[in-house]
Image: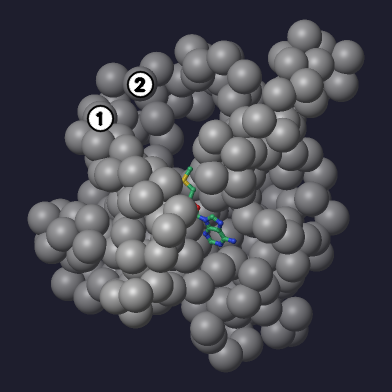
């Protein structure tokens, strides 16, 4: 493990992890949500979507643990994070917010290390933009969820076709992906979620005052209650 962490090129992953750890300090109740009549801030939105989760909650791509403070301390939290430099930050943050059961695995959303139908909820915020294979990741989420289990998501997505935002997103995509650790600025994640095979997907759009990574999409996708997948 040590030699892998020291491999050339890992300085970037390390820097990204350090940057994400700084994001943990942001006061998300002060980040205003626009064009949305449900919530006033990202903090309020996340509290509502994450605060009542119970049982085993798997978070894909948790970064440095920006969401950990929104969960009940009683959940059994499992992070699946491919960047090993995030792991110490996650462990630190889990302790800081008082999660009673938390562990992190090196892995990806495309291959979740769980049996079928074991997990109460899966959470992903600003990660479906970065996964290498979006449809495989969604199929894995469906596979591991219990019948009736839910996938909670908050994502930035592609602007509507024909808008200036979308034109810029398309133009800068290759450079953006290189600069931001594989992030796609123009992913049609909403369509992928609708087509993935969830029984129901409730979602809503909003915007933040950040250019390019806009609009945003948040919601809950529920797995069918009567069969495994
Ligand atoms: C923009 S960061 C978001 C971190 C965190 N979810 C948040 O909202 O602060 C994207 C995260 O997804 C992780 N990631 C990238 N590819 C992934 C994959 N295939 N499966 C799971 N996580 C992945 C990255 O390592 C990074 O931690």
Q: Relative to the observer, which residue lies in front, 68 or 151?
A: 68
Residue 212 % position (x, y): 62, 19
> Along the horizontal axis of the image, is 126 left or right of 176?
left
Q: In terms of secondary structure, where does tag 1 sit? A: loop
**Dot 2: few (<14), some (14–19), or many (≥20) neighbours within 10 Å?**
some
In the rendered image, residue 137, in percent from the top left (x then y), is placed at: 67, 65
Say which mark, if any, is on residue 31.
2
Residue 69 versus residue 85: which sits nearer the camera?
A: 85
For the C terminus, give its image quadrant.
bottom right
Quadrant housing residue 100: bottom left
Q: Is residue 69 above or below residue 225?
A: above
The residue lying furthest to the bottom in this view is 115
User: Residue drawn 35% across and 67% down?
Assistant: 5
Q: Is residue 138 visible?
A: no
Mark 1 and mark 2: span between their CA atoms?
9 Å
Residue 121 — which label? none
Is ligand 1 within 8 Å of the beta carbon of the residue shown at mark 2? no
In primary-sequence order, the first of circles 1 and 2 is: 1
Please report contact status of discs 1 and 2: CB closer than 8 Å, yes or no.
yes
The residue that appears at 53% across and 85% down in the rendered structure is 114
Residue 26 marker: 1
């Amino acid at each position: 493990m040590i030699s892998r962490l020291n491999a050339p090129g890992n300085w970037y992953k390390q820097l990204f992890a350090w940057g994400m750890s700084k994001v943990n300090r942001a006061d998300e109740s002060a980040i205003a949500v626009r064009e949305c009549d449900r919530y006033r801030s990202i903090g309020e939105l996340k509290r509502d979507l994450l605060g009542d989760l119970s049982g085993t909650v798997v978070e894909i791509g948790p970064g440095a643990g920006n969401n950990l403070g929104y969960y009940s301390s009683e959940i059994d939290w499992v992070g699946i994070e491919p960047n090993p430099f995030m792991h110490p930050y996650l462990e630190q943050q889990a302790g800081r917010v008082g999660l009673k059961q938390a562990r992190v695995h090196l892995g990806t959303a495309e291959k979740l290390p769980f049996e079928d139908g074991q997990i109460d909820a899966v959470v992903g915020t600003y990660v479906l933009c970065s996964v290498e294979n979006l449809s495989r990741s969604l199929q894995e989420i469906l596979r591991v969820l219990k019948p009736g289990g839910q996938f909670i998501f908050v994502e930035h997505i592609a602007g509507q076709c024909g808008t200036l935002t979308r034109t810029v997103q398309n133009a800068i995509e290759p450079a953006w992906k290189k600069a931001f650790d594989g992030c796609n600025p123009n992913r049609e994640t909403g369509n992928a979620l609708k087509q993935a095979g969830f029984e129901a997907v409730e979602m809503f759009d909003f915007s933040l005052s950040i250019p390019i990574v806009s609009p945003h999409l948040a919601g809950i996708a529920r797995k069918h209650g009567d069969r495994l997948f």
